[in-house]
Amino acid sequence: MPEKYTLRELRARKDWTQEETAKRLGVSLQTYNAWEQNFGSVKVSPAAAIAKVFGVPLDSIFFGNEIEKSSSEVED
């Protein structure tokens, strides 16, 4: 299962500001900030763009360890 990343961690790895990241994703600073703070939900199209910009699988941003945990809970 892929490792789970937060948007803040991914942004820090690129040494980008929130403003730079928002521009690269084509969203407002307020929208990106909400995503990073987990205040807003990310729609599928922007989610794919986020994964592409950071070069990581979509699962590792939005699901990661939660999928692994959920599947292990089902097995018990």
Image: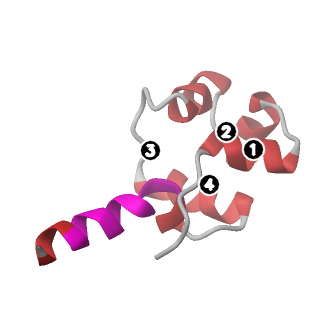
Q: Which residue is mark 1?
A: 11
2 vs 4, front mark = 2
Where residue 53 sits, quadrant-wise, is bottom right
Q: Are marks 2 and 1 in contact (CB under 8 Å)?
A: yes
Mark 3–mark 2 Cα distance, whole angstroms, equals: 15 Å
Left or right, residue 44 beside residue 34? left
Q: Which residue is mark 3?
A: 42
Q: Which residue is mark 2?
A: 8
Residue 26 in view in this figure: no
Which class describes the residues within 10 Å of circle 3: few (<14), some (14-19), or many (20+)?
some
The amino acid marked with disc number 3 is Val
Where residue 44 sits, quadrant-wise, is bottom left
The amino acid marked with disc number 4 is Ile
Q: Which residue is mark 4?
A: 50
- Magenta span contains residue 44: no
- Magenta span contains residue 64: yes
N-terminal-most mark, 3 or 4: 3
Which class describes the residues within 10 Å of circle 1: few (<14), some (14-19), or many (20+)?
some
Q: Where does the image place residue 20, in percent across and percent down from the top left?
A: 82, 36
Residue beneath the point at 57% across and 34% down:
36
Q: Where does the image place residue 3, in percent across and percent down from the top left?
A: 55, 66
Residue beneath the point at 72% across and 59% down:
54
- Magenta part of the protein: which range? 61-72
Tag count: 4
